[in-house]
Amino acid sequence: MYNTLLTLLVIVSILIIISVMMQPAKTDNASTALSGGAADLFSKQKPRGFEAFMQKVTVVLGILFFAIALGLVYISSH
């Protein structure tokens, strides 16, 4: 059981890395400092489509990661 959970933890970890890398970047650069932040008007919109899906996938994988990690701690302590 311990080895199965450990394997699942590694798989979920790799999937988290992939899902985070697939999300579009939301970086602030020097142009926002010069333009006065006018682009912030459109940055407050809710994510749609692929971006929203990837955010949900990342949240679910994060919850799975912590649940499996807690399961490993419980199994290793008994």
Image (spheres, rainbow, N blue to C red):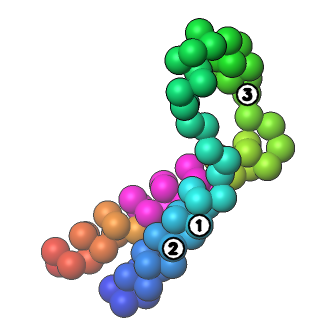
Element under disc 1: helix
Which residue, given by chain and number where applicable, does mark 2 sit on?
A: 14
Residue 27 locus on image (x, y percent): 56, 36
User: Does residue 22 appear left or right of residue 67 in this picture?
Assistant: right
Q: Work out whether mark 1 precedes mark 3 in sequence or the reverse, and give the earlier one.
A: 1
User: Does residue 43 appear left or right of residue 59 in this picture?
Assistant: right
Q: Can residue 60 be seen in the rendering of this structure?
A: no
State whether residue 26 is above or below residue 67: above
> Quadrant location of the N terminus?
bottom left
Q: CA distance from mark 2 to mark 1?
A: 6 Å
Q: Amino acid at mark 1?
A: Ile
Determine the residue positioned at 60% across, 37% down: 26
Which residue, given by chain and number where applicable, does mark 1 sit on?
A: 18
Q: Which residues are magenta?
A: 56-67
Q: Residues within 10 Å of mark 3 (few under 14, many from 20)?
A: few
Residue contact between numbered discs 2 and 1, judged by CB atoms under 8 Å: yes
Residue 10 locus on image (x, y percent): 44, 78
Q: Residue furthest right?
A: 49
Was residue 52 drawn as part of the magenta stretch in this picture? no
Q: Nearer the viewer, residue 12 or 30?
A: 30
Element under disc 3: loop
Which residue, given by chain and number where applicable, does mark 3 sit on?
A: 46
Q: Amino acid at mark 2?
A: Ile
Residue 19 locus on image (x, y percent): 61, 60
Image-quadrant location for residue 31: top right
Q: Nearer the viewer, residue 6 or 28?
A: 28
